[in-house]
Amino acid sequence: MAVETTITSGTEAPHFVASPIQPSWVIAGQPVARLALLSSSADGTASTYYWDCTAGRFNWYYSFDETLHILEGSVTLKAPSGTSRLVVAGDTVFFPAGAQAEWTVDKYIRKLAFCRTPLPGYLISARDISRKLKRLIKGGKQQETSGLL
């Protein structure tokens, strides 16, 4: 059975919408954040966004895994342990679900964010069992790879 796929691409300017930071998270300033959805997976567990924000200091609590790549500007990230790190354009950072960070944006920041909601453990186990059964049914043959690393 062939899987039908649709590959999408675009060069249109992203459509940013207001994405206010929760007021209880704001520590200083009046940061204004915006968001532009670029893509989302069919199962709703993964999405890609542009996000930008003006100056301010705020906490951020991650309810999903997020890998971000800074496109413009900078931010100082402070871990709950007190360790701080300046992140600038070109840097990539990963936050696992459950992480927390204090963000200090001096002027402006724009990032590309890859977000993924982790599957619960029981679904991961069910997926793994399903994959093993498929391999057994196919005679233990490995699936062809796409050639991507």
Image: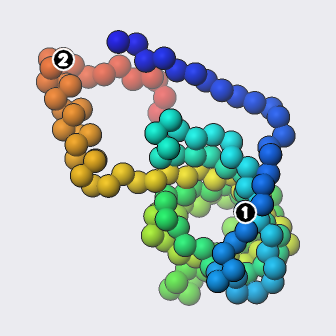
Of mark 1 and mark 2, the one earlier in the sequence is 1
In what element is the residue under mark 1? Answer: loop
* Residue 14 picture quarter: top right
Using the image, determine if residue 23 lies above or below residue 49. Answer: below
Using the image, determine if residue 26 lies above or below residue 134. Answer: below
Give the color scheme: rainbow, by chain, secondary structure or one colour.
rainbow
Pointer 2 residue: 138
Answer left or right for 9 relative to 43: right
Res 52 seen here: no
Residue at x-position 50% and y-position 44%:
44
Quadrant holding the N terminus: top left
* Residue 93 picture quarter: bottom right
Picture coordinates of residue 7, whole percent (x, y): 61, 24
Amino acid type at image mark 1: Ser
Picture coordinates of residue 118, whole percent (x, y): 41, 54
Q: Which mark, residue 19?
A: 1
Using the image, determine if residue 40 lies above or below residue 138. Answer: below
Residue at x-position 63% and y-position 53%:
113
Using the image, determine if residue 70 lies above or below residue 125. Answer: below
Res 107 seen here: yes
* Residue 89 picture quarter: bottom right
Of residues 16 and 78, the one drawn nearer to the viewer in this rendering: 16
Residue at x-position 26% and y-position 22%:
142
